[in-house]
Amino acid sequence: MAEPSNPQGNVELPAATVWPLVLAAGLALAGLGLATSALLSVVGLALMVTAVVGWVAELLPGRGHVAVPLAGVERRPVPVKPLPGRVEQLRPGMPGHRFRLPEKVHPISAGIRGGLVGGLLMPIPALTYGITSGHGPWLPINLLAGLLLPRVETQTLAELEQFQWTLFLVACGIHVVISLTIGLLYGVLLPTVPAFPGAQLLAGGLILPAMWTGASYGLMGVLNPALREHVHWPWYVVSQLVFGVAAAIVVVRTERVAVAPIVGRELPPAPREDRA
Amino acid sequence: MATIERESHVESPPWPARVHDWLTTVDHKKLGIMYVALAMGFLIIGGIEALLIRWQLMWPESRIFGQDTPTLFNQLFTLHGTTMVFLVGMPVLIGMANYLVPLMIGARDMAFPRLNALGLWTTLFGGLVLYLSFLTPGGPPAIGWFAYAPLTGHTFARDVGTDLWAMGLLVSGVGTIGAGVNFLATILAMRAPGMTLGKVPFFVWTILWTSVQILLAIPPLTAALIMVVLDRQLGAHFFDAANGGSPYLWQHLFWFFGHPEVYILILPVFGIISEVIPVFSRKVLFGYEFMAAATMGIAFIAMGVWAHHMYCVGLARTVDIYFAAASLLVSIPTGIKMFNWLATMYGGRIRFTAPMLFAIGFLAMFLIGGLTGIMLAVAPVDFQVSDTYFVVGHFHFTLIGGTLFGVFAGIYYWYPKVTGRMLSETLARWQFWLLLVGFLLTFGPMHVSGVLGMPRRIYTYLPDRGWDVWNQISTIGALIQAPSYLIFVWNLMASLRSGPPAGDDPWDAWTLEWATTSPPPPYNFEEVPTVRSRRPLWDFKHPDDPDWKYEG
Amino acid sequence: MSEPPSEALDPRKVGMLAFLVSEAAFFGTLIATFLFFLRPIRSGEPNPRDAFDIPLVLLSTFCLLLSSATIHQAHKSLLRGWRWAFLGWWATTMVLGIIFLGGTALEWSSLIQEKQLTISRNLLGSCYFTLVGFHAAHVSVGVVMLAVVLLLAMRDVVTPQQSLGAELVSWYWHFVDGVWVVVFAVVYVVAR
Ligand SMILES: [Cu+2]
């Protein structure tokens, strides 16, 4: 602690004053008068002038301040007690409370690999659906492109069953980007799942795919009307689950690495003296 | 603590002396208490207005005030909105900041104590001028809280109520600007030795940026209100379309103020939440630097998104796109904050006492309000639901679920410091659950009735629209909410006498205000402490493991 | 109260700057409104091209700009302890401010009586009288503050050691001059 109180044991504080109250009342009366009767405004203005004069007078050196004596000893603050070694620990067995959570994470490459593997396996059920339903393998691909390209929903079913270069490329692009993004998210999120056996697989293989499938069920009419129109929900759900399970397995099987510990420095920062 | 017992033996001065003391005080703590008390008084008034509005909408084709119902209904929602924004939201936050900022940065008072007093009194008198309209022949204004032209023109509002509305806001605006100036000077130039701007408590940081917004947003409102008064009193033509004026200009000017205003009402609450969550999770605020940058980002972006309130007047398409994109941008810094609060709680040893309860309520409710806000920022969605109950539901989720829940969290947290007494946890729980359930029932269904097409501000509706049941749930929800506020006020008053003594530091917290007595002496600190980290009290309590070792 | 060391921020200076920022936002709104309503005026109505008496305005503008220089000189003299120079420059500033207000008064009376331009006549009147009126009100407040400082200086309350009040008043005065430059450009140049 620095800056001892002054030798007399007094603190200089601004004195109580009525002028702010009077000024505010004058201002309100003046405003009220503008809307009602000029007489009120005159009174308000007079109050304002009086208040400003009184206020300025208090700003003069040597006025407007009082010395407040310090409170009696029994009413001083209880000094803050240093409690060395009493740092509350977040978890038993930890050296202190300064650790990063989660303690171990998957490397970024795990997320990328998970996304890639999931992305490679996911088309299998999708294409299976296309072929077994008789629409051919291109329909699911063209429908996916409708997420980005306008007017796909205006094509007829026959057109959508044909191979189309632009749609194919766009669909591939969308597929890769989304697969990688979700894979990376898996890498970050799965280590935060509570640690009981199989929890990570459950979260990554079932819960998360169920969540985004539900969301896409609600939003697909807006995001991708073409897909909404032609989608076959059971197969759609199966492809999402295949992705989720594959990505989760890949991510979970990767070796986790410890997070760099937080290291403190030894010397305190020099306090910047703002005031003398 | 012994201090409290001893206090009751000290003879208190006779009441005229005490009243004089409060009327002339320039102590930031007393002014802060009066600001909050003023806000609580107006909260009850505005709440009664809301209950009347809900009661009128309970059944289709009802007229609870007989023949006068349409006019009275318009006056009620005008007063309700104006009161809640200008006389409850801003005063309660300015009041809390008034009390806390000097204590948190180790100062003896605000930079301009007399200006501070002026701010309180102009807010009070501004409110009185507005409510004096009840005594005028035409009654209160019936123009809505954003007072679109030409409703404020002399042709449509011949009575003096509208003038009093403008005057009241002008007068209280003076005080708000004064408060902004005062906070900036205090925070920038009166911090304790060692407390660099990067080490201020997070609440102080949010008040800094709130003040910047006050200084940039309130003066345009002042100018616009002056134009309304000139139009009405001296026959100017600013908003008078018949003579070349532009009602559309009023919308721009009002919302140039109005949008930053909603951040003036929420940024300090972000600060409160950022103080409460770490202390009650026993962890450092996660990502202070990112939180600080996000606050700054919100303050800047918020100055450039106002026209998302105006999609339906027919702006140019490019203008729509710009304002939609800019508004959506706000969700990024806000999202950063949400995730950082969650990350602060993650792995922490959470104490579910009243402040934390309300903080968690804030996180959940404000999230919903934020998400519907993102929907409304998208111009095509807004075309569909603008000026419906969907919008009403949205902003009540941000203002009650956000601002009010946060304010309650803050009051439960700091009341022991202000009074030296703890509030009752039992009553707090009753209040919380009644408020939460009542709040969800009131404002949740409004999203449905809004999507079904119910416009806001209609005084009644026909029974065949399918709106009845949603309105009835809303009204029942309001009736469930109402007692929660009474419980709160009762808790505040009863605990003043009978609450358990709090001691200096009941929550084992880390910012400077907990280093002095509860309540603090007039001069706050005998000795101004030297600060080395963002949690000075942590450093004092744990010299073997101080924060300064880990802060940049 | 002792003056804080020079490198630390002084709350009073920060407060004055913050106040001036809010004033800038206020005038910014009035100026934006003026520009918003710049449009052809119906023939027969007073319009910016022939309503305004430019030589008169130029003269009062010159006085106001000059007063910025004189108040700067006054402050410099105060810091150097040249009491009489300070009083002289400060009083000159005040006189120049009063001349400016006189110019505005002349302009208004000619506009109202000869050109029949009033605040309720048309939008030009509404915008012009509001913008120029609020600027003149700020100049008047400035003149009053100058007078108060002058009185205190004559009673030896304003000294080189206690010069902050005078400095803050000079900031306000420079700000009001700066606003006038923009108002002049908008009202008398762009609007034509
Ligand atoms: Cu907005």
Image (cartoon, rainbow, N blue to C red):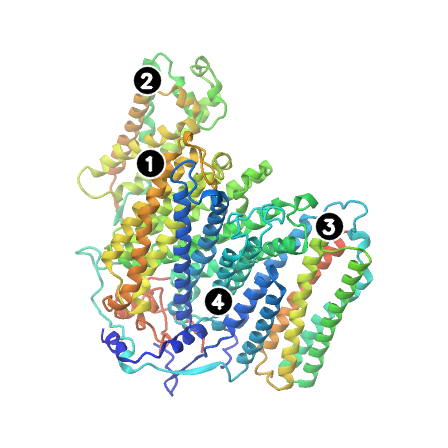
Vertical side of B352 occupied by A143: above or below: above
> Which of the two marks, 1 or 2, is nearer to us in this view?
2
To which residue does mark 2 refer?
A: A129
On residue A183, which mark appears? 1
- The three-letter amino acid code for the residue at tag 2 is Tyr
Whether discs 1 and 2 lie on one chain: the answer is: yes
Vertical side of B29 occupied by A163: above or below: above
On residue C122, which mark appears? 3
Instruction: Return the x and y of residue B199 as percentages of the image width and height.
Output: 39, 64
Query: For numbered disc 4, what is the local secondary structure?
Result: helix
- The three-letter amino acid code for the residue at tag 4 is Trp
**Marks 1 & 4, CB-CB < 8 Å contact:** no
**Marks 1 & 3, CB-CB < 8 Å contact:** no
Q: Nearer the viewer, residue A186 or C177?
A: C177
Chain for mark 2? A
Q: Nearer the viewer, residue A54 or C11?
A: A54
- Mark 3 vs mark 4, CA separation in Å: 38 Å
Sequence-wise, which precedes: disc 1 or disc 2?
2
- Quadrant where the C terminus of chain B sits is bottom left
Instruction: Return the x and y of residue B175 as percentages of the image width and height.
Output: 51, 64
- Mark 4 vs mark 2, CA separation in Å: 73 Å
**Marks 1 & 2, CB-CB < 8 Å contact:** no
The reply to whether residue B37 is in sight is: yes
> 10 Å neighbourhood of mark 4: few (<14), some, or many (≥20)?
many
Q: Is mark 1 within 8 Å of ligand 1?
A: no
Query: For numbered disc 1, what is the local secondary structure?
Result: helix
Chain for mark 4? B
To which residue does mark 4 refer?
A: B121
- The three-letter amino acid code for the residue at tag 1 is Gly
